[in-house]
Amino acid sequence: MGAIRISEEVTAEEIQSIARELQILRNQIQTISSQSSEYGITVEALSKQDPSRPVYRSLGNILLEVDDRESLESELKDAQEALNEHLGRLVEREESIRKRYEEMTSSFERA
């Protein structure tokens, strides 16, 4: 009696699941990229703002005047850097899953 062979065939459902995961990752990448870009625009605008004019920060439903612009700029840059690091991890994951998706579709087409 021969050994039982576990099927390694890829199903259409598995491919659809990977495709959904890829779409979710792409949406997350787009969102994080946009947020990072907004931080960059904000930092640039802050650096161009006349130092004699007040700068405000939104906190909930109110605006508070900022006393320490350097601290605010540092916070904004740190937040942008954290988003960029997260973005890098998402892109790596997306590339890995995309490669897996391509392998699965190729395997499915041969079946």
Image (spheres, rainbow, N blue to C red):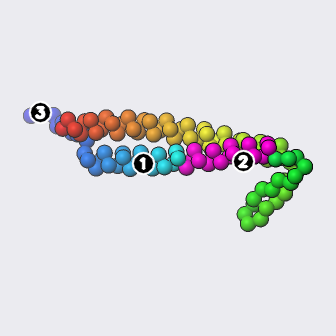
Residue 72 % position (x, y): 79, 47
Q: State the quadrant of the N terminus.
A: top left
Of the residues tagged 3 and 2, which is closer to the observer? 2
Q: Is residue 108 magenta?
A: no
- Name the residue that disc number 2 marks: 42
> In the image, which residues are magenta?
31-48
Judge left or right: residue 39 versus residue 90.
right
**Furthest residue toward left:** 1
Q: Nearer the viewer, residue 30 or 47?
A: 47
Residue 61 % position (x, y): 73, 66
Q: Does residue 75 appear anywhere in the picture?
A: no
Distance (Cα) linking label 3 and label 2? 67 Å
- Name the residue that disc number 1 marks: 23
The residue type indicated by label 3 comes to Gly
* Residue in the image at 52% along x and 47% along y: 30
**Furthest residue toward bottom:** 61
In primary-sequence order, the first of circles 1 and 3 is 3
Distance (Cα) linking label 1 and label 3? 42 Å
Residue 73 % position (x, y): 78, 44
The residue type indicated by label 1 comes to Gln
Q: State the quadrant of the C terminus.
A: top left
- Name the residue that disc number 3 marks: 2
Q: Main secondary structure of the magenta part?
A: helix
* Residue in the image at 26% along x and 35% along y: 106
